[in-house]
Image (tube, grey):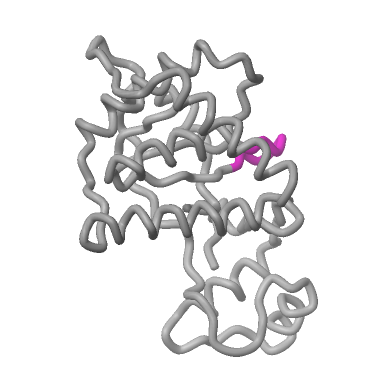
Amino acid sequence: MSYGVFGTRAVLLDLVTDRYLLLGEAEAAALAALAKPDPSASPALVNALLARRIIVEGAGSVIAPVDQPRPLASALETLDGGGGVSTLEASLSCIRAILSIRTMGLARTIMRARAFRRRCERRRDGRLVTDSGRAAFFARGFAEARIGVPLPRRCVPDSLALARCLWNRGIAADVFFGVQLDPLLAHAWVQIDDVVLSDPLNIAADYCPVFRL
Protein backbone atom coordinates (compact mmCIF):
# COMPACT_ATOMS: atom_id res chain seq x y z
CA MET A 1 0.00 0.00 0.00
CA SER A 2 1.33 3.43 -0.92
CA TYR A 3 0.48 6.93 0.22
CA GLY A 4 1.65 10.53 -0.04
CA VAL A 5 3.10 12.54 2.84
CA PHE A 6 2.02 16.13 3.49
CA GLY A 7 3.94 17.32 6.51
CA THR A 8 2.38 15.45 9.42
CA ARG A 9 -0.60 14.24 7.36
CA ALA A 10 -0.96 11.54 4.72
CA VAL A 11 -3.22 10.99 1.72
CA LEU A 12 -4.21 7.65 0.18
CA LEU A 13 -6.10 6.78 -2.99
CA ASP A 14 -8.97 4.34 -2.49
CA LEU A 15 -9.14 2.68 -5.90
CA VAL A 16 -12.42 0.92 -5.23
CA THR A 17 -14.38 4.09 -4.44
CA ASP A 18 -12.14 6.38 -6.53
CA ARG A 19 -11.71 8.70 -3.55
CA TYR A 20 -8.77 10.26 -1.78
CA LEU A 21 -8.52 9.72 1.98
CA LEU A 22 -6.85 12.28 4.22
CA LEU A 23 -5.27 10.97 7.43
CA GLY A 24 -4.64 13.25 10.38
CA GLU A 25 -1.38 13.49 12.27
CA ALA A 26 -1.98 10.53 14.61
CA GLU A 27 -3.21 8.15 11.91
CA ALA A 28 -0.41 9.20 9.54
CA ALA A 29 2.15 8.54 12.28
CA ALA A 30 0.63 5.10 12.91
CA LEU A 31 0.81 4.30 9.19
CA ALA A 32 4.47 5.36 9.10
CA ALA A 33 5.18 3.22 12.15
CA LEU A 34 3.62 0.18 10.51
CA ALA A 35 5.99 0.63 7.56
CA LYS A 36 9.03 0.07 9.80
CA PRO A 37 10.66 -3.37 10.18
CA ASP A 38 9.66 -3.35 13.87
CA PRO A 39 6.18 -1.72 13.93
CA SER A 40 5.47 0.34 17.04
CA ALA A 41 2.06 1.89 16.36
CA SER A 42 -0.40 2.01 19.23
CA PRO A 43 -3.11 -0.69 19.14
CA ALA A 44 -5.85 1.96 19.31
CA LEU A 45 -4.59 3.72 16.18
CA VAL A 46 -4.08 0.41 14.38
CA ASN A 47 -7.67 -0.50 15.19
CA ALA A 48 -8.79 2.88 13.85
CA LEU A 49 -6.99 2.21 10.56
CA LEU A 50 -8.54 -1.27 10.43
CA ALA A 51 -12.00 0.17 11.08
CA ARG A 52 -11.59 2.58 8.15
CA ARG A 53 -10.39 -0.36 6.00
CA ILE A 54 -7.16 1.52 5.28
CA ILE A 55 -5.23 -1.56 6.34
CA VAL A 56 -6.24 -5.19 6.76
CA GLU A 57 -4.99 -7.93 9.02
CA GLY A 58 -2.52 -10.50 7.76
CA ALA A 59 0.27 -10.44 5.20
CA GLY A 60 -0.06 -7.96 2.38
CA SER A 61 1.79 -5.45 0.27
CA VAL A 62 4.50 -3.24 1.74
CA ILE A 63 3.32 -0.05 3.41
CA ALA A 64 5.45 2.88 2.23
CA PRO A 65 5.23 6.38 0.77
CA VAL A 66 5.20 6.55 -3.02
CA ASP A 67 8.69 6.25 -4.48
CA GLN A 68 8.94 8.95 -7.16
CA PRO A 69 12.04 10.52 -8.71
CA ARG A 70 11.68 14.27 -8.44
CA PRO A 71 10.57 15.53 -11.88
CA LEU A 72 13.20 17.81 -13.43
CA ALA A 73 12.18 18.03 -17.09
CA SER A 74 9.24 17.54 -19.45
CA ALA A 75 9.35 15.75 -22.78
CA LEU A 76 6.78 18.24 -24.06
CA GLU A 77 8.89 21.32 -23.34
CA THR A 78 11.54 20.84 -25.96
CA LEU A 79 12.09 21.63 -29.62
CA ASP A 80 12.86 17.99 -30.37
CA GLY A 81 10.43 16.19 -32.63
CA GLY A 82 8.27 13.23 -31.85
CA GLY A 83 6.40 10.55 -33.72
CA GLY A 84 5.68 6.86 -33.96
CA VAL A 85 2.07 7.10 -32.69
CA SER A 86 -0.81 7.40 -35.14
CA THR A 87 -4.05 9.21 -34.49
CA LEU A 88 -5.82 5.84 -34.76
CA GLU A 89 -3.65 4.29 -32.05
CA ALA A 90 -4.06 7.29 -29.77
CA SER A 91 -7.84 7.22 -30.35
CA LEU A 92 -8.18 3.52 -29.59
CA SER A 93 -5.99 3.80 -26.48
CA CYS A 94 -8.03 6.73 -25.14
CA ILE A 95 -11.36 5.07 -25.93
CA ARG A 96 -10.22 1.84 -24.26
CA ALA A 97 -9.23 3.69 -21.09
CA ILE A 98 -12.39 5.80 -20.97
CA LEU A 99 -14.71 2.82 -21.46
CA SER A 100 -12.81 0.73 -18.93
CA ILE A 101 -13.11 3.38 -16.22
CA ARG A 102 -16.76 4.02 -17.06
CA THR A 103 -17.86 0.37 -17.13
CA MET A 104 -15.52 -1.32 -14.63
CA GLY A 105 -14.35 1.45 -12.32
CA LEU A 106 -10.87 2.62 -11.45
CA ALA A 107 -9.76 -0.39 -9.40
CA ARG A 108 -10.42 -2.97 -12.13
CA THR A 109 -9.02 -0.62 -14.76
CA ILE A 110 -5.77 -0.40 -12.78
CA MET A 111 -5.71 -4.19 -12.44
CA ARG A 112 -6.12 -4.58 -16.20
CA ALA A 113 -3.38 -2.01 -16.85
CA ARG A 114 -1.01 -3.88 -14.54
CA ALA A 115 -1.81 -7.14 -16.31
CA PHE A 116 -1.13 -5.54 -19.71
CA ARG A 117 2.20 -4.19 -18.45
CA ARG A 118 3.18 -7.65 -17.21
CA ARG A 119 2.32 -9.13 -20.61
CA CYS A 120 4.53 -6.52 -22.28
CA GLU A 121 7.33 -7.43 -19.85
CA ARG A 122 7.00 -11.14 -20.62
CA ARG A 123 7.30 -10.43 -24.33
CA ARG A 124 10.66 -8.78 -23.61
CA ASP A 125 12.41 -11.29 -21.37
CA GLY A 126 10.68 -10.11 -18.22
CA ARG A 127 11.52 -6.42 -18.19
CA LEU A 128 10.80 -3.12 -19.89
CA VAL A 129 13.64 -0.71 -20.59
CA THR A 130 14.14 2.67 -18.92
CA ASP A 131 14.95 4.74 -22.00
CA SER A 132 14.07 8.39 -21.42
CA GLY A 133 15.01 9.41 -24.96
CA ARG A 134 12.72 6.91 -26.69
CA ALA A 135 9.99 7.55 -24.13
CA ALA A 136 10.13 11.29 -24.79
CA PHE A 137 10.02 10.75 -28.57
CA PHE A 138 6.89 8.60 -28.39
CA ALA A 139 5.31 10.85 -25.75
CA ARG A 140 5.62 13.81 -28.09
CA GLY A 141 4.23 11.65 -30.88
CA PHE A 142 1.26 10.72 -28.69
CA ALA A 143 0.68 14.39 -27.81
CA GLU A 144 0.66 15.31 -31.50
CA ALA A 145 -1.69 12.43 -32.36
CA ARG A 146 -3.96 13.30 -29.42
CA ILE A 147 -4.76 16.65 -31.04
CA GLY A 148 -6.72 14.77 -33.68
CA VAL A 149 -8.72 12.70 -31.19
CA PRO A 150 -12.22 14.22 -30.78
CA LEU A 151 -12.57 13.32 -27.11
CA PRO A 152 -12.44 15.52 -23.99
CA ARG A 153 -9.06 15.51 -22.30
CA ARG A 154 -9.05 13.74 -18.94
CA CYS A 155 -5.83 13.18 -17.07
CA VAL A 156 -6.50 9.60 -15.92
CA PRO A 157 -7.61 7.97 -19.20
CA ASP A 158 -5.09 10.03 -21.18
CA SER A 159 -2.28 8.94 -18.87
CA LEU A 160 -3.33 5.30 -19.06
CA ALA A 161 -3.55 5.56 -22.85
CA LEU A 162 -0.05 7.03 -23.14
CA ALA A 163 1.38 4.48 -20.72
CA ARG A 164 -0.16 1.65 -22.74
CA CYS A 165 1.48 2.97 -25.92
CA LEU A 166 4.85 3.12 -24.16
CA TRP A 167 4.59 -0.31 -22.50
CA ASN A 168 3.63 -1.81 -25.84
CA ARG A 169 6.95 -0.47 -27.18
CA GLY A 170 8.93 -1.95 -24.31
CA ILE A 171 9.36 1.28 -22.34
CA ALA A 172 9.04 1.27 -18.55
CA ALA A 173 7.04 4.43 -17.85
CA ASP A 174 4.93 4.89 -14.72
CA VAL A 175 1.56 6.52 -14.12
CA PHE A 176 1.39 8.67 -10.99
CA PHE A 177 -1.73 9.85 -9.19
CA GLY A 178 -1.13 12.91 -7.05
CA VAL A 179 -2.92 15.56 -5.05
CA GLN A 180 -2.62 19.07 -3.72
CA LEU A 181 -4.18 20.13 -0.44
CA ASP A 182 -5.98 23.35 0.53
CA PRO A 183 -7.87 23.19 -1.78
CA LEU A 184 -7.89 19.53 -2.72
CA LEU A 185 -6.91 19.01 -6.35
CA ALA A 186 -6.04 15.71 -8.02
CA HIS A 187 -4.10 14.88 -11.15
CA ALA A 188 -2.54 11.93 -12.99
CA TRP A 189 0.55 12.01 -15.19
CA VAL A 190 3.12 9.75 -16.86
CA GLN A 191 6.80 9.85 -15.93
CA ILE A 192 10.04 7.96 -16.58
CA ASP A 193 12.92 8.62 -14.22
CA ASP A 194 12.87 12.39 -13.68
CA VAL A 195 11.19 13.21 -17.02
CA VAL A 196 7.47 14.00 -17.21
CA LEU A 197 5.98 12.58 -20.40
CA SER A 198 2.37 13.81 -20.38
CA ASP A 199 2.45 17.34 -18.99
CA PRO A 200 4.51 20.50 -18.69
CA LEU A 201 6.95 20.22 -15.78
CA ASN A 202 5.29 22.83 -13.58
CA ILE A 203 1.96 20.99 -13.60
CA ALA A 204 3.25 17.59 -12.48
CA ALA A 205 5.72 19.12 -10.04
CA ASP A 206 2.88 20.85 -8.18
CA TYR A 207 1.39 17.52 -7.06
CA CYS A 208 2.50 15.10 -4.38
CA PRO A 209 2.18 11.51 -5.62
CA VAL A 210 -0.02 9.15 -3.60
CA PHE A 211 -0.17 6.16 -5.98
CA ARG A 212 2.13 4.72 -8.62
CA LEU A 213 1.15 2.33 -11.39
Q: Position of residue 140 (x, y in %)?
A: 34, 20
**Which residue is at the front of the view, 127 or 62?**
127
> Which residue sits at x=27%, y=45%?
170
Total residue callouts? 0
> Which residue sits at x=69%, y=89%?
43
Q: Position of residue 81 (x, y in %)?
A: 25, 13
Q: Which residues are magenta?
A: 179-186
Q: Is residue 127 left or right of residue 14?
A: left
Question: Is residue 45 visible to the viewer in this orientation of the structure?
Answer: yes
> Which residue sits at x=74%, y=73%?
53
Residue 153 within the magenta-colored segment of the rendering: no
**Which residue is at the front of the view, 112 or 21?**
112
Q: Is residue 33 left or right of residue 152?
A: left
What quarter of the picture does the N terminus occupy? bottom right
Corner quadrant of residue 149: top right
Q: Is residue 164 left or right of residue 125?
A: right
Corner quadrant of residue 34: bottom right
Q: Position of residue 126 (x, y in %)?
A: 26, 63
Query: In the figure, 142 relative to 15: above or below?
Result: above
**Which residue is at the front of the view, 31 or 131?**
131
Q: Position of residue 175 (x, y in %)?
A: 46, 44
> Which residue sits at x=39%, y=59%?
118
Query: In the figure, 34 relative to 198: above or below?
Result: below
Question: Is residue 193 visible to the viewer in this orientation of the structure?
Answer: no
**Which residue is at the front of the view, 2 or 60?**
60
